[in-house]
Image (cartoon, grey):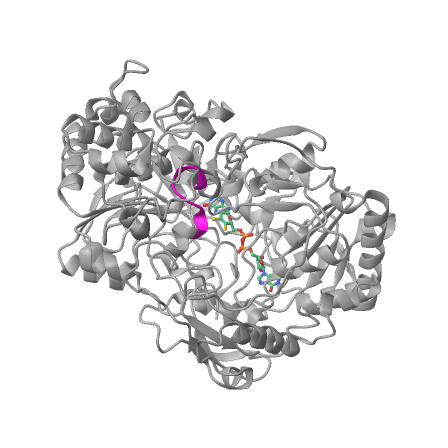
Amino acid sequence: MTHWGAFEADSDGDRLTAVRPWRDDPEPMRLIENVASAQHHPTRVDQPYVRQGWLERGPGGTGRGDEPFVPVSWETALDLLSGELARVYREHGAEAVYGGSYGWASAGRFHHAQSQVHRFLNCLGGYVRHVNSYSLGVSTVLLPHVIGDIGWIMTQATSKESLVEHAELVVAFGGLSPKNSAVSPGGVSRHNTRGWIGAARARGCRFVSITPLRDDTPAEAAAEWLAPRPGSDAALMLALAQVLDAEGLADTEFLDKYTVGYERFVGYVRGEVDGIVKSPEWAAPITGLTVERIRTLAREMAAARTLVTVGWSLQRAQYGEQPLWLGVVLAAMLGQIGLPGGGFGHGYGSAASLGEPARKFSPPRLPQGPNGVDTFIPVARISDMLLNPGQSFEYNGQHLVYPDIRLVYWAGGNPFHHHQDLARLREAFTRPETVVVHDPFWTSTARHADIVLPSTMTIERDDYGAGENDRVFFAMKAITRPHGEARDDYAIFGELAERLGVGKEFTEGRTVVEWLRHLYEEWRQRHTEHDLPDFDTFWASEHIELPVPDPQQVLGADFRADPQRFPLTTPSGKIEIFSETIDSFGYADCPGHPVWLEPDEWLGGPAAAEFPLQLIANQPRSKLHSQLDVGAYSQSTKVAGREPVRLHPDDAAARGLRDGDVVRVFSKQGSCLAGLIIDDAVRQGVAQLSTGAWYDPDPTDPAFCRHGNPNVLTPDRPSSTLSQGSTGQLCLVDIERYEPDLPDLTVNRPPAIMINGT
Ligand code: PGD
């Protein structure tokens, strides 16, 4: 099982000889083609390595990311690393260790790398952790103030079945991307995006896809495509709200009974606060849409059973709170929250799990134990933390201070893929004394480490797992031997724990299979009301199905039926259109109700004079994030070996560019090469370059990536003071043909390795 689907495979013991999608998957993904081709790629880490300078001069950041690596035995690597961990914990304490280790790692829940590293560091006294995610940095903070926590929104979302049967209009801000909704943390058994959308459409449901990219919604939707200026959705939503209010279409009964603060908000919409009525006439020049279409869309929304869904991408941007909050407000004004097929949704096109009905219970997980350190950072503040120890900052009403980090431990993530302004991250990564990375591959993060330990891939170890909300719980048996000397993260931590005197605490004396059996049987005992098979039967079978109580679940149905008995978890127990709590923080970049705030980088602002294209740095279609970028399917989508960038024909013509050209994409932060695809599925004024190409910095200029990683271009700017989330989705750029000879890529082969002193 992978995050992007289950598959069956044949193997000769060392490699996969054939890979087939799971026979029960109606819409399998080509991403599985990456697995077999990447497994023994030269960029697999074959044994432990230590950076030359760290080995010779001891801890310190000089040379990190530039110097060659020295192959060492497991004994040497584990001795060196346990000695260094003991030193840092002894001299500086647990608060000097950053173990946040953000990343998706692999499917399979026992070997989930973040759980493993956190459990291990907790045995040593703890670590500085991260909160929130790059996926949902804004939502996780905002939504509990407004409607409910993100876990509730994700697991209790109105089901796709309910939408198929009842929705008449789906207004999808950010679209319903078939590639993003093919992926879910922990895996996907039966992909069904095209299925549910096609079935809803066949029943007569209309789709409006509001996004700069036409193919953000599958053909099955036969969607109307509206492409406002990226970053201007909040203005469009305010204008929709204004029409609902002005034409008496807002459901005042619903607003009175289930919400607080509408009057404050609607005063702003009516122009009572700033003298500006947020009408379609106001929004049209901001968004680039017509007055007429904004007005008619509002009327259509009020006349139908309407789902307002906001994609995760909209909140991965500066002021990302505003369109998300407005999505809730619009749904509340329509009065359909809690009704089948209508209301509010967040991410039907962002992850496969959205709209899958909740399971009665989740599969077992490895316990991580208590963390002895309270200090944390919002995940996307990694560079700020490393560059500014001791500096204070604000987050969600709290005054926090960045800790002084001496050792960074990363397993299962790739910050040199996922973080913004990679040249700045590279500078930040020079600050710790020691950086440790476990990864199966020589990712850009592994290349910026001092100690690199090779971990196994999923296909090389026994595990089990199910994706979020996914009812199929798979036994995942090892299919091949590990590549080279790779070891499971669990085995690595077990050996380190032994050396550091906490072996018993970490392993509890169990092997992997003993853990699987133990966790499974403990879990089975907790759910005796269900006829779950014993471990041996489960392990011998391929999968079991977990019970799903309500396939027609509707978000907020209980609340609608009885708001006293089933209040929301917000401070008032109701939907907060105005939040006293957020207002009390006094943040200018996220006031007490949603507003239009002009982003620093958008096509309507002054910065567009210098950089006239809006970059959409979205999720890739040929891989998950940066995973298996060296795999066959991912490689087949490259243009001249570079990540493809898509541009509208008029924008290409204006720059004299041709399909297949290698171009330089540049922004205030940096530049990268990319291979041009001209495509009218991209809105004019927009360039789309997905994330995921492994960062391949020019040796003299870390802000220039030869491969096409858009995060050299994106600014390291927080979404707002409230959420401090990632804003990787949007930035302003320009594009020109790259005239010099094409530089070779180096990231698709191992880094420089010293053998016998050379
Ligand atoms: P992955 O490529 O999934 O990216 O960032 P994330 O760091 O999660 O990295 C996972 C790493 O884990 C890979 O290097 C993989 O090889 C390794 N790995 C896999 N299995 C194992 C294992 O068992 N053990 C160990 N030790 N390692 C393993 C993703 C992040 O990127 C996310 S979630 C989002 S939503 C963001 N999206 C954007 C965006 O939209 N735009 C921009 N510009 N930037 C983004 N970055 C974010």
Indicate yes or no whether the magenta region holds residue 145: yes
Q: Position of residue 46 (x, y in %)?
A: 68, 67
Q: In this orientation, which residue lies closer to the viewer: 751 or 264?
A: 264
Q: Is residue 752 above or below residue 465?
A: above
Q: Is residue 305 above or below residue 219?
A: above
Residue displayed at 51% across by 46% down: 134
Residue displayed at 42% across by 36% down: 736
Indicate yes or no whether the magenta region holds residue 62: no
Residue displayed at 44% across by 59% down: 184
Q: Position of residue 746 (x, y in %)?
A: 61, 53
User: Position of 441 compared to 244: left or right?
Assistant: right
Residue 425 visible here: yes
**Quarter of the picture for ligand 1?**
bottom right
Q: How many marks?
A: 0
Please tell me in which quadrant of the rendered image residue 244 appears: top left
Hey, which residue is sitting farthest front in the picture?
565
Q: Main secondary structure of the magenta part?
A: helix
Q: In this orientation, which residue lies closer to the viewer: 679 or 368?
A: 368
Q: Position of residue 506 (x, y in %)?
A: 73, 65
Q: Is residue 647 above or below residue 501?
A: above
Q: Give the position of the C terminus as an image quadrant.
A: bottom right
Q: Which residue range is magenta in the image?
A: 144-151
